[in-house]
C-alpha cells in the first residue's frame, strides 16, 4: 500500500483498500448538522495556518523563529481543486519531465514566485500511478548534472518518495546513472530508522485524517512525507493547504518530532497543535472549540 495517499469517502460508503490508496470512511459526519461558516478570529495571518490567541503560549513556538520561511506541500490530487493556470503549469511540467524536455521544464519552473516553483517541481502528475516528480524523472532519464543541480536549486526534494517508496537516488542507481549519485545522495536508513519513519508518518496521517473527517471533507489527499520535512533547515516549515477546510496544516521537524498546527477558518477555536513521534501523537496546544482526539502510544511489550 502506498503511504501518504488518502481517500476520504462519503458518509455512507465503507472503508476499502487497493494497491495505491487507503480509503478512509467518514461515518460520523452529518452534513445537515454542520454549523454555519464563521470567520475564525484566531489571528490576521490565519490564511497561512498560523495559530492564534486561543492557544496558550507557555513554550517557545518552533514556527516563530526569526526569518521563518514557508515551503509548500501540495496535498491536492484533484485537478478541479487547482486554479486553471496552476493546473495547466503542473500538466506542462509533468509532461516535460516525462519526456526529458529539461530546457522547457526549467524555463517554466523559474517563475517569480518561489513557492509556486517548489510546488511545480515536487508535485506528481494528476492521476499518477508512480508518484514521480521532476527529480525522479531526471534520475530515470539520467539527466545532465547541470539539470539536476538546477532542479535542486528550485527546491526539488532528494527525500521525496514515489508511491513505491523509491527515492530519486534509488532510481538513478537502478538505471545505472552513477554520475548523479553524489547529487542525489541521502543517508542510508538503518532498519530501526526506517521503522521509526513509517511509524511517525502513520501517526501523523492518522491525526490529519481525523481533522479532515471532523470537517466532513470528501476527496483524495496526498499527505506529507517525513523526508522533505527533515530536509528543511531550522528556519523553514511546510504548509499544506486543504481545499474545503479553509485552512490546512503547518509542519516542522523539531528535535526528533513533527510539530503540526492545524486550523480551519470555518470553525472558531478549532486550531490544534500536535507533537508526533514514532510512539505517540500528543496534543500540546488546543483551541477552545477543538474536539478531543488522542492517538495512544504503541505498545512496547
Image: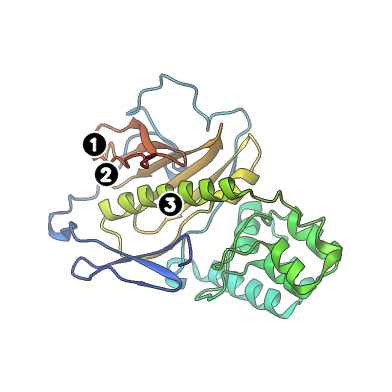
Disc on the earlier residue, 3 or 1:
3
The reply to whether the C-beta atoms of the residues labelled 2 and 1 are less than 8 Å apart is: yes
Q: Residue at x 46, y 48 (%)?
A: 199
Identify the secondary structure beneath mark 3.
helix
Residue 176 lies left or right of residue 233; in this view the side is right
Residue 33, image quadrant? bottom left
Q: Nearer the viewer, mark 3 or mark 2?
A: 3
Q: Nearer the viewer, residue 277 or 289?
A: 277
In the picture as drawn, the residue positioned furthest to the bottom comes out as: 99
Query: Can see residue 298?
Result: yes
Q: Please identify the quadrant where the C terminus is shown.
A: top left
Read off the residue under disc 2.
267
Name the image quarter holding residue 146: bottom right
For the point 32% across and 29% down, the residue is: 54
Disc 3/disc 2 C-alpha distance (Å): 26 Å
* In the depicted structure, whether residue 205 falls above or below residue 232: below
Can you give x and y, in whole percent of width and height, for residue 82 in the image? 47, 66
Point out which mark residue 202 bears. 3
Horizontal and vertical percent for residue 101?
76, 77
Residue drawn 50% across and 22% down?
A: 60
Q: Residue furthest left?
A: 33
Real-space Cα separation, disc 3 to disc 1, in angstroms: 26 Å
Towards the viewer: 252 or 199: 199
* Residue 178, picture quadrant: bottom right
| Residue occupying image coordinates x 36% and y 51% | 206
Does dot 2 land on a helix, a strand or a loop?
Answer: loop
Which residue does the numbered mark 1 point to in the structure image? 289
Query: Within 10 angstroms of label 3, few (less than 14), some, or many (20 or more) residues?
Result: some
Amino acid at each position: 500500500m502506498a503511504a501518504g495517499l488518502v481517500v476520504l469517502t462519503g458518509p455512507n460508503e465503507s472503508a476499502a483498500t487497493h494497491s495505491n490508496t487507503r480509503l478512509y470512511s467518514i461515518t460520523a459526519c452529518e452534513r445537515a448538522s454542520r454549523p454555519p461558516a464563521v470567520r475564525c478570529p484566531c489571528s490576521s495571518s490565519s490564511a497561512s495556518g498560523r495559530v492564534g490567541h486561543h492557544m496558550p503560549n507557555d513554550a517557545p513556538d518552533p514556527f516563530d523563529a526569526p526569518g521563518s520561511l514557508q515551503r509548500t506541500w501540495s496535498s491536492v490530487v484533484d485537478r478541479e481543486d487547482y486554479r486553471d493556470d496552476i493546473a495547466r503549469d503542473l500538466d506542462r511540467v509533468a509532461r516535460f519531465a516525462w519526456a526529458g524536455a529539461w530546457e522547457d521544464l526549467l524555463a517554466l519552473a523559474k517563475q517569480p514566485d518561489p513557492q509556486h516553483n517548489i510546488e511545480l517541481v515536487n508535485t506528481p502528475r494528476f492521476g499518477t500511478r508512480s508518484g514521480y516528480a521532476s527529480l525522479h524523472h531526471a534520475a530515470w532519464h539520467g539527466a545532465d548534472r547541470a539539470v539536476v543541480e538546477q532542479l535542486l536549486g528550485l527546491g526539488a526534494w532528494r527525500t521525496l518518495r514515489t508511491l513505491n517508496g523509491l527515492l530519486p537516488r534509488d532510481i538513478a542507481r537502478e538505471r545505472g546513472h552513477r554520475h548523479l549519485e553524489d547529487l542525489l545522495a541521502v543517508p542510508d536508513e538503518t532498519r530501526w530508522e526506517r521503522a521509526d519513519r513509517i511509524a511517525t508518518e502513520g501517526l501523523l496521517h492518522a491525526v490529519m485524517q481525523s481533522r479532515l473527517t471532523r470537517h466532513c471533507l470528501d476527496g483524495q489527499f496526498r499527505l506529507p512525507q517525513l523526508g522533505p520535512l527533515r530536509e528543511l533547515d531550522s528556519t523553514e516549515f511546510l504548509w499544506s493547504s486543504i481545499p474545503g477546510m479553509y485552512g490546512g496544516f503547518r509542519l516542522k521537524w523539531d528535535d526528533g518530532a513533527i510539530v503540526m498546527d492545524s486550523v480551519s477558518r470555518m470553525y472558531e477555536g478549532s486550531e490544534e497543535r500536535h507533537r508526533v513521534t514514532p510512539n505517540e501523537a500528543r496534543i500540546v496546544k488546543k483551541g477552545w472549540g477543538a474536539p478531543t482526539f488522542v492517538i495512544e502510544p504503541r505498545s512496547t511489550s
